[in-house]
Image: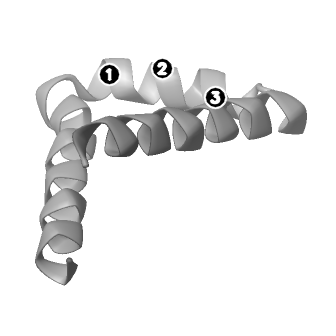
Amino acid sequence: MSEALLGALALMLVVEGLLPTLNPQLWRRLFEQALRLSDGQIRFMGMASVLAGLALWHLLT
C-alpha cells in the first residue's frame, strides 16, 4: 500500500510540474486567475477534485 501511495504522489508531482516547465507564462496567468476566486469557489473546486479522485480510486481498486 505504501509503495502505491508513494507512486501516486510521485506521479502527481510530475503532472503538477509539467505546466510550469512547458509554459510558465500560461501557468502564471492561471495562478493569477485562481487568486481572484472566492473562498467558496476554491473550496468547491477542492472538494470536486477530492471526490473525483476518490471515485477514480474506487473504480481502479
Pick the quarter of the image with the N terminus.
Answer: bottom left
Q: Nearer the viewer's eye, disc 3 or disc 1?
A: 3
- The amino acid type found where label 2 is placed reads Arg
Q: Secondary structure at mark 3?
A: helix
Number of the label disc, if any, that sits on residue 29:
2
Q: Is there a contact, CB below 8 Å, between mark 3 and mark 1?
A: no
Left or right placement of residue 4 versus residue 19 in this view? left
The label number, if any, that marks residue 53 in the structure image? none
Alpha-carbon neighbours of circle 1 within 10 Å: few (<14), some, or many (≥20)?
Answer: few
Mark 3: few/some/many CA within 10 Å (<14, 14-19, 20+):
few
Whether tag 2 and tag 1 are in contact, CB under 8 A, the answer is yes
Q: Quadrant of residue 39?
A: top right
Classify 10 Å Cα crowding around label 2: few (below 14), some (14-19), many (20 and above): few
Q: Earlier in the sequence, mark 3 or mark 1?
A: 1
Which residue type carries mark 3? Ala
Residue 38 visible in image: no
For marks 3 and 2, give the CA distance: 9 Å
Look at the picture and state if 11 lies above or below 47.
below
Q: Coloring scheme of the render?
A: one colour
Q: Quadrant of residue 37?
A: top right
Q: Type of residue at label 1?
A: Gln
Residue pointed to by mark 3: 34
Q: Residue at x 14, y 48 (%)?
A: 14
Q: Residue furthest bottom?
A: 2
Q: Nearer the viewer, residue 7 or 20?
A: 7
Residue at image location 20% in from the left, 22% down from the top: 23
Q: Which residue is mark 1?
A: 25
